[in-house]
Image (spheres, rainbow, N blue to C red):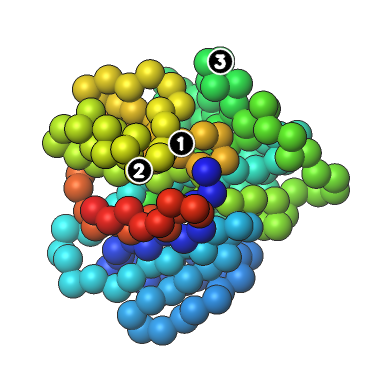
Amino acid sequence: MIIEKLLLDTNKIADLRNFYKDMLGLNITEDTPQCLTFKVGETLLSFKETANKNHPFYHFAMNIPNNKFQQAKKWLQDRGVKLNREDGKDEVYFETWNAESVYFEDPAGNIVELIARHHLPNKTEGEFSSEDLLNVSEIGIVRDQVLPFVQELNNIGIPCWKEADESFASVGNEEGLVIVVKRGRRWYFSNKDAEIFPVTVWIKGIGKIVQ
């Protein structure tokens, strides 16, 4: 499943421009006072200016080559990105997913994850760079009731990837996942509880999902 575009609300658009363009080196494809769009491999990552005073924040992940996890971690640190920690560690290996992840927050408070999925044949050569941010591979969508929304996704042709329960579900595949979580559940590698904010996701061959 390919996430072609992701549209998120923010009231920190200028700070996000500096972070993603100047610190991480992403290319801008749209830059107006109301909308800022970056190219992340196969995905367009867009932030829309909002008057919401609640400071919208989201969780999303970017796939990286399966052979460059430690390079990616050092690349972030070399650019002054502070890594989030969980149980005293700044990285994690998910045994059931066969994947390694590192997390950080951008200036808007979005919880961003770089994930190397070792089942995917996406090895690349050379030093890690922004070109190795292959795509946005996860977006968290928050609901009061998880399983009914999972069923909606199943009904439009997006299957569950792992088992779903009343607080967490991963729907799609390793190229692209909708992570459905219950409102109030703490986001992993953060001190933030999941809240509901507007999000629009365009999925190749499926169409648009709006919250």
Camera-side residue: 196 or 152?
A: 152
Whole-percent x and y of residue 125?
A: 85, 45
Q: Of helix, strand and loop, which one carries label 1?
A: strand
Between tags 2 and 3, which lies in front? 2
Q: Amino acid at mark 2?
A: Ile
Whole-percent x and y of residue 35?
A: 38, 76
Q: Is residue 22 visible?
A: no
Q: Which mark is residue 156?
A: 2
Q: Amino acid at mark 3?
A: Glu
Q: Is residue 70 left or right of residue 151?
A: right
Whole-percent x and y of residue 74?
A: 67, 42
Question: Which residue in the structure is indicated by mark 1?
Answer: 172
Q: In terms of sequence position, does the residue under pointer 2 or pointer 3 come before the other?
A: 3
Name above or below for residue 94 compared with residue 51: above
Q: Amino acid at mark 1?
A: Gly
Q: Is residue 107 left or right of residue 204?
A: left
Q: Residue at x 32, y 53 (%)?
A: 209
Q: CA distance from mark 2 to mark 3?
A: 29 Å
Query: Which quadrant of the figure has residue 146?
Result: top left
Q: In terms of sequence position, does the residue under pointer 1 or pointer 2 come before the other?
A: 2
Q: Is residue 8 left or right of residue 98?
A: left
